[in-house]
Image (cartoon, rainbow, N blue to C red):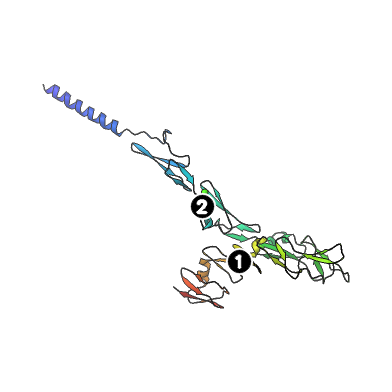
């Protein structure tokens, strides 16, 4: 009688533990590829189930994930020139004459003169987004814009130093001369001078170039302020760093610029005052 009771007791324990182990048995759907997560999601095993989480750079419920177009925002992905959307990410590129900064977003001028004198025979002048070759007195820049030729005397042609063309002089079939401009420049109304356009070296602007009647106008992306040179963009940090509140800012800007640390009021000179 006692034996049968003990036997039932042990049978009961065995049944219960079997039931517990059956209930707690879990299948790792992720490891066994039984999940229905998107290709662009991470599968996470849970007790009795699993979760799908879209990878960074994607949005969705995990079963369906689509790429986030970071460039579609007004912020342009934080790129100061061009933003290229790619699956799961994005990257910034810069216009010709610029290189991408280490932060992957800002664009910096390439100093073409630093290597091989920019290919200039005599003088190389680096500029924001471009460069220019110049010649010493007594020499003229030739049409290839890099070599210099001796200035001839008393010849009424384009070789005449008084032809007045800012860039390129052409001799017409009628025997007169006509001025032309280098690519990216436009001939002004006086038919001699050339004005820069945004199509060349980003108009000399580091960030944004806008075509105006009198030539390009530069502006900067968010978090940057236009330097007094009208071309360079200065990071907020460097302005704070060099200009503590209360100190006179030597900027000749016509814009009202508000920073987190100080407010700059537009006058002929800018004063920095704590907010
Ligand atoms: Ca993307
Ligand atoms: Ca340059």
Q: Is residue 228 above or below residue 114?
A: below
Residue at which label 2 appears: 70
Q: Could you tell whether 9 is left or right of 86 in the image?
A: left
Marked residue nearer the N-terminal end (1 or 2): 2
Q: Position of residue 251 (x, y in %)?
A: 57, 74
C-alpha distance separating marks 1 and 2: 25 Å
Quarter the C terminus occupies: bottom left
Which element is circle 2 on? helix
The quarter of the picture where residue 31 lies is top left
Quarter the N terminus occupies: top left
Residue sitting at the far right: 154
Q: Is residue 67 above or below residue 213?
A: above
Q: Could you tell whether 206 is left or right of 192 in the image?
A: left
Q: Disc 2, ligand 1: is the CB inside 8 Å?
A: yes
Residue at which label 1 appears: 218
Residue sitting at the far left: 1
Which element is circle 1 on? strand
The quarter of the picture where residue 127 lies is bottom right
Q: Residue at x 61, y 63 (%)?
A: 209
Foreground residue among 107 and 154: 154
Asked whether the viewer can see residue 4, the reply is yes
Q: Callout 1: 10 Å neighbours few (<14), some, many (20+)?
A: many
Q: Position of residue 47 (x, y in %)?
A: 33, 38
């Amino acid at each position: 009688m006692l034996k049968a009771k003990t036997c039932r007791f042990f049978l009961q324990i065995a049944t219960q533990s079997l039931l517990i182990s059956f209930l707690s048995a879990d299948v790792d759907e992720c490891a066994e590829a039984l999940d229905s997560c998107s290709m662009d999601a991470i599968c996470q095993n849970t007790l009795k189930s699993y979760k799908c989480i879209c990878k960074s750079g994607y949005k969705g419920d995990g079963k369906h994930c689509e790429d986030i177009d970071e460039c579609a925002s007004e912020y342009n992905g934080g790129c100061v020139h061009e933003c290229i959307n790619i699956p799961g990410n994005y990257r910034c590129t810069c216009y010709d004459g610029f290189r991408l900064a280490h932060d992957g977003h800002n664009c910096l001028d390439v100093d073409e003169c630093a290597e091989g004198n920019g290919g200039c025979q005599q003088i190389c002048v680096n500029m924001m987004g471009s460069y220019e070759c110049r010649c010493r007195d007594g020499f003229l820049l030739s049409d290839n814009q890099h070599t210099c030729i001796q200035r001839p005397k008393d010849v009424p042609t384009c070789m005449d130093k008084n032809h007045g063309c800012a860039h390129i002089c052409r001799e017409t079939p009628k025997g007169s001369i006509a001025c032309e401009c280098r690519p990216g420049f436009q001939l002004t109304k006086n038919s001699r001078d050339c004005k820069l356009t945004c199509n060349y070296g980003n108009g000399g602007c580091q960030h944004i170039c806008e075509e105006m009647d009198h030539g390009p106008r530069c502006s900067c992306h968010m978090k940057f302020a236009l330097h007094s040179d009208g071309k360079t963009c200065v990071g907020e940090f460097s302005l704070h760093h060099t200009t503590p509140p209360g100190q006179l800012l030597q900027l000749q800007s016509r814009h009202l610029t508000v920073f987190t640390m100080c407010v700059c009021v537009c006058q002929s000179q800018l004063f920095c005052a704590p907010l």
